[in-house]
Amino acid sequence: MSTASHLIGRIAGALVALLLAAAPAMAADQDAAKTIAALKARIAAPRLRIERIRAYDDIENLDSAYGYYLDKNLWNQLADLFAKDGSLELAQRGVYIGQDHIRAFLPAFGGPEGPKVNRLGNHLNLQPVIHVSPDGKTAKVRARLLQMMGEAGRSAGWGAAVYENEMVKEDGVWKYKLDHA
């Protein structure tokens, strides 16, 4: 269980206890509509905190999936990580907008779909700093890239960079809005 999931469980448990303890006292003093309104107000801040924790977790997982799909030449899965109008600029080879254009570009950039025998590809996005917007619909992510690439008997190399990307919550799922690598 992740730290975020554990924290969410503890917060949810505390909310239930708070509601159970507060409801009888509040109901005695106010009518049902006022009681419900007061309870909703008390729940709002913890609910927002839970949503932010989930967003952070989801975005960090999205960032890790991106690196994995890129390393394994899983272009269709990688393109699916982008919003419908998402944008990819990879290695100064143009800007591609929309999943279809991204999907068409990736094989031209990295070769045929699927892992290659005797090829190393490790694209690690590390130390993410994630800022979720107040409305919980967009986020900015800054992460370090550590890259190890090579082909047996031919080449090997290390790379590093800083990524500054934007994410958007589309149909309830976090996606890349802007990937500038």
Image (cartoon, rainbow, N blue to C red):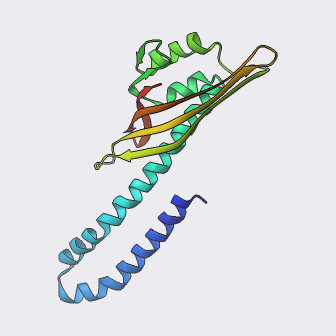
Vertical relation: 63 (above or below) 154:
below
Vertical relation: 75 (above or below) 134:
above
Front-lying residue, 43 or 33: 43
Vertical relation: 87 (above or below) 16:
above
Residue beneath the point at 57% across and 10% down: 108
Instruction: Please state the horizontal and vertical placement of residue 97, each as a whole percent of the image.
Output: 39, 18
Task: Judge left or right: residue 94 versus residue 160.
Answer: left
Instruction: Please state the horizontal and vertical placement of residue 120, each as a whole percent of the image.
Output: 73, 25
The quadrant the N terminus occupies is bottom right
Vertical relation: 106 (above or below) 174:
above
Task: Judge left or right: residue 145 versus residue 15.
Answer: right
Residue 115 in view here = no
Residue 19 in view here = yes
Instruction: Please state the horizontal and vertical placement of residue 138, each as a whole percent of the image.
Output: 34, 41
Residue beneath the point at 46% across and 32% down: 163
Front-lying residue, 7 or 36: 7
Residue beneath the point at 42% across and 33% down: 164
Q: Residue furthest right?
A: 153
* Number of numbered labels in the structure image: 0
Instruction: Please state the horizontal and vertical placement of residue 177, each as a whole percent of the image.
Output: 39, 30
In the figure, residue 47 lies in which quadrant? Answer: bottom left
In the figure, residue 178 lies in which quadrant? Answer: top left
Residue beneath the point at 62% across and 29% down: 147
Task: Judge left or right: residue 80 versus residue 70.
Answer: left
